[in-house]
Image (cartoon, rainbow, N blue to C red):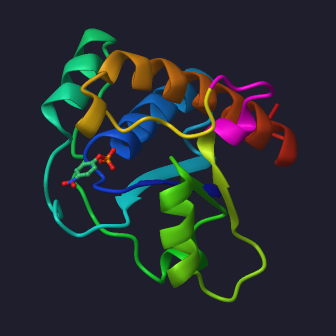
Amino acid sequence: MVHVLFVCLGNICRSPMAEAIFRKMVAEENLSDYIHIDSAGTGSWHIGASPHEGTRGILDEKDISYEGQKARQVHVNDWDTFDYIIAMDDQNMKDLNKVRQADNHTVVKKLLDFIPHPEETNVPDPYFTGDFNYTYELVSKGCKHLLQYIKEQHYLN
Ligand code: 4NP
């Protein structure tokens, strides 16, 4: 089993979007029994909240389920559980590194780093930009490349 955690600041816009998109992609490749997916925020403001209405709106439009998803904060135990901790931007990376546990197995990387020639290196935060469509396009592209990478690394092809 490969464990993947998507991380953003609030866990209501970008990382729940990535979680939902990635779960659908994984299901479409019949890999749900092999890849476990979750998301969390570095901040604590929205613990227990459902995804933001903008995230829900675009996921509804694309027919992608986010059922049962509730915001939670990153926890030190996540370094024991997850093989991949996937951040949305540089600030998330900084915040994750502050609580990072001595560990030599968890890969901590930004989502868009998996795209060969990305147009952006950070996923813009639609909580501030209001542009959920652009964030969706980038997150989808990142998830596609991330899945390809994981399949290759773990012989899931
Ligand atoms: P997210 O967006 O990190 O993509 O979930 C944010 C959501 C809420 C806040 C900041 C970013 N906030 O400051 O409450």
State whether the magenta stretch is mostly helix, strand or loop: loop
Give the residue at x 28% y 55%. 10
Horizontal and vertical percent position of residue 11: 30, 52
Examine the image and state in which quarter residue 133 appears: top left
Residue shown at 26%/10% (left/top)?
A: 61
| Residue 62 placement, left or right of 92 | left
Above-or-below relation of 129 to 47: above
Seen in the image, is 39 located left or right of residue 101? left
Q: Can residue 98 be seen at all in this image of the molecule? A: yes
- 48 with respect to 66 (left or right): left
131 to the left or right of 18: left
Q: Which residues are magenta?
A: 112-119
> Is 116 part of what is drawn in magenta?
yes
Q: Residue 47 in the image: x percent, y percent?
A: 18, 64
Residue placed furthest toward the front? 129
> Foreground residue, 116 or 156?
116
User: Which corner quadrant holds the N terminus?
Assistant: bottom right
User: Which image quarter: residue 105?
Assistant: bottom right
Vertical placement of residue 89 versus 133, above or below: below
Q: Position of residue 112 (x, y in %)?
A: 64, 36
For the point 61% across and 30% down, which residue is it? 120
Is residue 64 on the magenta stretch? no
Query: In which image quadrant can residue 136 be found?
Result: top left
Looking at the figure, which quarter contains the C terminus? top right
Nearest the eye: 79 or 23: 79
